[in-house]
């Protein structure tokens, strides 16, 4: 990975967003000629960033900020600011930019799941719990939504104690058709405040063995 600084194009203060000044680091990876870390001023656009990294010829989508949404090839002129990306239905996030070359056989809604599976995430699920936008979801929920079988009104919720250790965490079991489909924790629980370990959040499969 390399850092490339000293972007030659000059941006006036007017083109930099009013609520954020200075520069930001962007990590560009995927199918580009020069993956690396680039430092650009707030207000630069996505097209300029991709030109620095060497974009592919057949670009289909650019996910921004990890799970911050997709940018289409015809939207590359968006400003890399909080307001600019929000107007395009995406988020600036951590500045992660993944360049993808996909064809019509690729299922775009499942691309984030593939990215997560190939990452170093430990799958504790707490990023999902604290995500302020609701952009992240559990794999079980994601799969059911993709299959068209996720029906939240049909679920019942039961709060019980976690038996994996003696900390005293409360679990809220989301159940449908006598199957646990998701586990959360009440935010007012003094032990968890909504946060669970990997066993508490995902260690329920043994309950469903018949």
Image (spheres, helix red, strand yellow):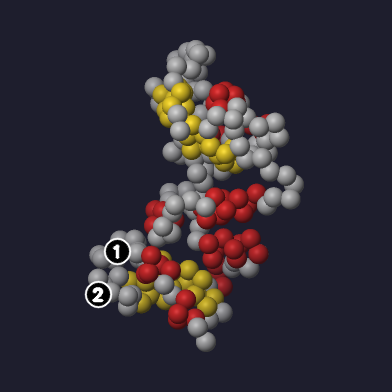
* Disc 1 crowd, CA 10 A, few/some/many (<14, 14-19, 20+): some
* Label 1 secondary element: loop
| Residue drawn at 33 percent across, 71 percent down | 170
Name the residue at 41% across, 24% down. Answer: 23
Q: Is residue 190 above or below residue 205?
A: above
Q: What's the residue at 63%, 60% (across, down)?
A: 146
192 w.r.t. 59: above or below: below
In front of the other: 14 or 118: 118
- Looking at the rendered image, the disc whose residue lies closer to the viewer, 1 or 2, is 2
Mark 1, residue position: 192
Residue displayed at 44% across by 20% down:
5
Q: How many marks?
A: 2
Dot 2, crowdedness within 10 Å: few (<14), some or many (≥20)?
Answer: few
Q: Position of residue 130 (x, y in %)?
A: 39, 53
In-image side of 59 versus 27 (left or right): right
Disc 2 on helix, strand or loop? Answer: loop
Left or right: 11 in relation to 146: left
* Residue placed most toward the observer, 152 or 7: 7
Is residue 181 rendered to the left or right of residue 186? right
> What percent of the width, then of the height, locates residue 132?
43, 49
Q: Which residue is mark 2?
A: 166
Does residue 112 appear anywhere in the picture? Answer: yes
Residue 203: image location, x then y, percent: 41, 72
Residue 159 lies in quadrant: bottom left
Question: Considering only order in the chain, which callout, 2 or 1, is on the residue closer to the N terminus?
Answer: 2
């Amino acid at each position: 990975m390399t850092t490339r600084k000293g972007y030659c194009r000059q941006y006036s203060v007017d083109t930099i967003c009013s609520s954020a000044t200075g520069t930001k680091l962007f990590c560009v990876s995927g199918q580009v000629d020069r993956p690396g870390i680039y430092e650009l001023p707030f207000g630069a656009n996505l097209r300029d960033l991709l030109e620095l990294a060497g974009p592919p010829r057949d670009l289909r989508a650019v996910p921004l900020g990890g799970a911050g949404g997709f940018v289409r090839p015809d939207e590359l002129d968006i400003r890399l600011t909080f307001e600019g990306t929000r107007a395009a239905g995406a988020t600036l996030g951590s500045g992660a930019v993944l360049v993808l070359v996909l064809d019509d056989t690729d299922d775009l809604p499942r691309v984030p799941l593939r990215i997560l599976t190939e990452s170093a995430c430990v799958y504790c699920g707490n990023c999902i719990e604290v995500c302020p936008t609701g952009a992240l979801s559990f794999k079980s929920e994601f799969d059911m939504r993709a299959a068209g079988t996720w029906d939240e009104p049909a679920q019942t919720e039961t709060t019980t104690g976690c038996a994996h250790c003696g900390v005293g965490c409360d679990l809220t079991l989301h159940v449908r058709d006598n199957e646990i489909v998701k586990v959360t924790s009440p935010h007012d629980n003094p032990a968890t405040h909504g946060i669970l370990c990997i066993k508490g959040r995902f260690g329920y499969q043994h309950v469903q063995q018949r």
